[in-house]
Amino acid sequence: MIGIIDYGMGNLRSVQKAVEFLGGKAVITAEKSELDKCGRLILPGVGSFAAGMENLEKTGLSDYVKARVGELPILGICLGMQFLLDESEEEGVHKGLGLIPGRAVRFTEGKVPQMGWNAVSDMRSPLFAGIRDGSQFYFVHSYYADTTDEYAIGKTEYFRTYASAIGKGHVYGVQFHPEKSGDLGLQLMRNFMRL
């Protein structure tokens, strides 16, 4: 069972449908007792970093996620990936979960948000097993992860090179939406389900 963390924001049902399409089972919940029964956690997200973190803090889900690190694989998607970082500069500086060193910073060039298909290269993670380097995934975001190469498990070019996938131990994050990225996105989800 995969637990999709419901903190009141995000594309929860589309992530659940992707897991179910692949033959897995997923529950959308904010109940820690339900999440305790899960072997993997997904932290999706769409919207404002500050509002999302406030909801995670208020519900106690931020402490819950931190407590499960090391016990099971965790995947952050889009805004959920940014939550994994130390902080974000969106609407002022706000603290993240601090699970992967780095901060979310705004693009200063090009059309913002970056919206549409873009390539991910320098892939180095079991998340990308069976996926050709340079494959295209679907992005919608105004902020990107500013982190070191140590934690960048995939990179993308958009007026600069940035970490579009990050990882540390069993904690992974992808800036793109695998659930909206066709067969390759489903392959990434399948890989996560096998970790």
Image (spheres, rainbow, N blue to C red):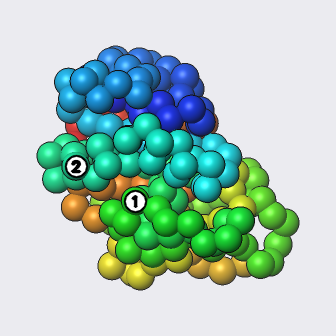
Picture coordinates of residue 112, whole percent (x, y): 81, 64
Query: In the shown orientation, is residue 35 left or right of residue 54?
Result: left
The residue at which mark 2 appears reads as: 67
Q: Is residue 195 left or right of residue 136?
A: left
Mark 1, other Cα within 10 Å: few <14 / some 14–19 / many ≥20: some
Residue 24 visible, this angle: no
183 left or right of 116 in image: left
Q: Quick one: 134 or 88, which is closer to the camera? A: 88
Given the current orientation, which residue lies at the most extreme right position? 111
Are the residues at dot 2 and dot 1 in contact (C-beta closer than 8 Å)?
Answer: no
Identity, as a three-letter code, of the amino acid under mark 2:
Ala
SS type, badge 2: helix
| Secondary structure of the residue carrying numbered label 1 | loop
* Quarter where residue 158 is shown: bottom right
The residue at the point 60 percent across, 72 percent down is: 93
Could you tell me which quadrant the C terminus lies in? top left
Residue 168 percent coordinates (x, y): 28, 65
- The quarter of the image holding the N terminus is top left
The residue beneath circle 1 is 97
The residue under the point 59% across, 36% down is 10
Which badge, 2 or 1, comes first in the chain's sequence?
Answer: 2
**Residue 117: assigned label:** none
| Residue at 61 percent of width and 55 percent of height | 49
- Crowding near the residue tagged with mark 2, few <14, some 14–19, many ≥20 C-alpha atoms within 10 Å: few
| Vertical comparison of 110 with 6: above or below | below
Q: Amino acid at mark 1?
A: Leu
Q: How many marks?
A: 2
Asked if one can make out residue 142 in the rendered structure from this viewpoint, the answer is: yes
